[in-house]
Image: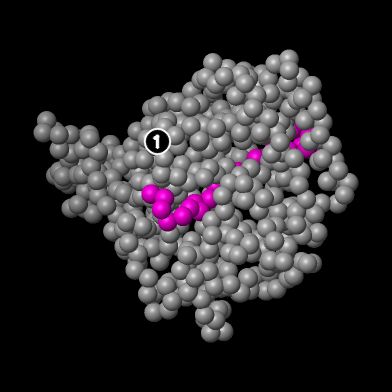
């Protein structure tokens, strides 16, 4: 089936052969932000309603405010007003879980030995904001900046005119010489309460007033660090098999999971990508984290993604966790989106189940075709912001969802992280050096035979595969070059395997 183009809600879209069944249809798309996909889906819904199209998600989420009643036990909230406005969700539902696992991630990388593909001749921290901002270094001296709010004057006052008495109270000296009481707040709190009067007011251990959320629209609470050298100098990294110019890595995370997965366990599939982004950007790479939705109703496929963290940006852990792991977004807004997009693009009613989530292997098959569609968009100059032209450096960072114990989950997170790290090393250094890197990194924590088996599995996953639709396939010379690169890597690995 040749590419079929149409315009839906003012946007040009295309459909192709499904990689799961060539008699079925696949729709692929890319959006810039969370807000872009939300706004577009609302337009799609309006267009469908205008045509009097019927689909189950219309009744559940659209008509008369929606008949579906969310549940705290499933979505994590029964506040339909909040769930219907997902851009208002600014704090991850399970903050304690996120904090705990970020600490665990720090321990994973604490003694990590990076191979030559990610090493520098010299790495050093600097005060100059010319490199990558290092949150881990900055957090060692992180503190809340302060402001003083005077309720009598109803404004934030000059802290140079504020004194503290022996009872710990703050007083502002006014122009007439009298004193007015002040409240110690985190800088930005007063502006936050004006912009978001429903923000929750909290008090820190040292008596400072602040709010939850810490960000709302264009307002955020201010932090500072006593650690001066928080920027990591970097040098350009060029890869071996991509023409010597590629320095971007894209990782994809998805919240897709069946209804039996506990809400707090959705976070684990995002952690390998967070860990990879932290590690590679410290070493000078530019890493982007993308949320991706992959659905396969009756072997039809629709896939869309959008950027959560762009190249070179520090990781906003809240944003990654909310977009890719928060059940209030996935089990309400994403369900709503999937129903509308499936109807508009594929003329399919997903029904009450809202489609079918693919397992890891099936996701890899679908992801291969999606990457080739991205390549097609780059070549035709679609205007979509896609910078990474190397298909081998678009990596699926998700692990299958489960309700297994914390230790089992973290073992899978670490294994997936190292698999992606090996793929990057293969691309930038070749397999011969990359397996040496893997051995140096993991010796003492994993048996050598297991390190080699893990690496070989990662290497075989780099084999180039043709997509189902001819309109997405690379020109033969390009595909042959990728195949040659893969075969050379496989041959070199097999030659030294017995000597390791």
Residue 444 place in picture, x, y as percent: 54, 16
Magenta stretch: give its range.
Answer: 236-262
Q: Is residue 396 above or below residue 57?
A: above
For the point 54% across and 56% down, the residue is 357
Residue 64 place in picture, x, y as percent: 39, 79
Residue at the outermost right position: 477
Residue closer to the observer: 20 or 69: 20
Where is residue 383, by image quadrant?
bottom right
Magenta residues: mostly which secondary structure? Answer: loop
Residue 189 place in picture, x, y as percent: 31, 48
Residue closer to the observer: 360 or 340: 360
In screen coordinates, is 374 left or right of 330? right
In screen coordinates, is 56 left or right of 23? left
SS of the residue under disc 1: helix
Query: Can residue 471 be seen in the rendering of this structure?
Result: yes
Dot 1 crowding, Cα within 10 Å, few <14, some 14–19, many 20+: few
In screen coordinates, is 11 left or right of 195? right
Query: Can residue 102 be seen in the rendering of this structure?
Result: no
Q: Quadrant of the N terminus?
A: bottom right
């Amino acid at each position: 089936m040749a590419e079929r183009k149409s315009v839906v809600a003012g946007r040009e879209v295309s459909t192709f052969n499904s990689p799961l069944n060539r008699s079925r249809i696949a729709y692929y798309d890319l959006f810039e932000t969370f807000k872009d996909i939300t706004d577009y889906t609302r337009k799609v819904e309006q267009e469908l309603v205008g045509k009097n199209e019927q689909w189950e998600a219309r009744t559940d989420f659209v008509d008369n405010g929606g008949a579906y009643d969310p549940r705290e036990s499933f979505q994590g909230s029964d506040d339909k007003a909040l769930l219907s406005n997902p851009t208002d969700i600014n704090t991850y539902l399970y903050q304690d879980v996120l904090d705990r696992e970020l600490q665990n991630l720090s321990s994973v990388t604490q003694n990590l030995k990076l191979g030559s593909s990610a090493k520098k001749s010299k790495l050093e921290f600097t005060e100059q904001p010319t490199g990558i901002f290092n949150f881990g270094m900055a957090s060692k001296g992180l503190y809340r900046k302060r402001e003083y709010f005077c309720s009598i004057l109803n404004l934030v006052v000059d802290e140079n005119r504020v004194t503290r008495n022996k009872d710990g109270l703050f007083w502002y000296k006014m122009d007439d010489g009298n004193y007015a009481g002040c409240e110690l707040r985190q800088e930005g709190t007063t502006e936050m309460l004006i912009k978001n009067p429903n923000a929750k007011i909290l008090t820190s251990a040292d008596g400072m007033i602040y709010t939850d959320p810490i960000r709302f629209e264009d307002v955020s609470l201010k932090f500072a660090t006593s650690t001066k050298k928080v920027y990591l100098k970097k040098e350009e990294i060029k890869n071996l098999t991509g023409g010597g110019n590629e320095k971007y890595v894209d990782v994809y995370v998805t919240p897709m999971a069946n209804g039996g997965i506990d809400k707090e366990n959705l976070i684990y599939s995002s952690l390998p990508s967070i860990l990879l982004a932290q590690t590679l950007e410290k070493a000078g790479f530019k890493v982007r984290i993308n949320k991706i939705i992959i659905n396969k109703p009756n072997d039809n496929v629709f896939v869309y993604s959008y950027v959560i963290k762009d190249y070179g940006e520090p990781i906003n852990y809240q944003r990654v966790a909310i977009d890719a792991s928060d059940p209030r977004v996935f089990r309400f807004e994403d369900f709503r989106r999937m129903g509308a997009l499936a109807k508009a693009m594929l003329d399919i009613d997903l029904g009450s189940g809202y489609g079918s989530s693919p397992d890891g292997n099936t996701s890899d098959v679908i992801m291969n075709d999606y990457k080739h569609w991205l390549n097609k968009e780059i070549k035709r100059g679609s205007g979509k912001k896609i910078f990474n032209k190397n298909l081998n450096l678009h990596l699926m960072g998700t692990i299958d969802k489960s309700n297994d114990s914390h230790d089992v989950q973290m073992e899978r997170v670490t294994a997936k992280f190292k698999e992606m790290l090996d793929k990057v090393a293969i691309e930038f250094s070749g397999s011969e050096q990359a397996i040496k890197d893997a051995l140096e990194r993991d010796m003492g924590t994993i048996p050598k035979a297991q390190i080699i088996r893990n690496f070989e599995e990662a290497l075989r996953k780099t084999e180039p595969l043709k997509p189902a639709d001819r309109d997405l396939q690379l020109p033969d010379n390009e595909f042959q070059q990728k195949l040659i690169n893969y075969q050379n890597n496989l041959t070199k690995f097999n030659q030294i395997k017995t000597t390791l």
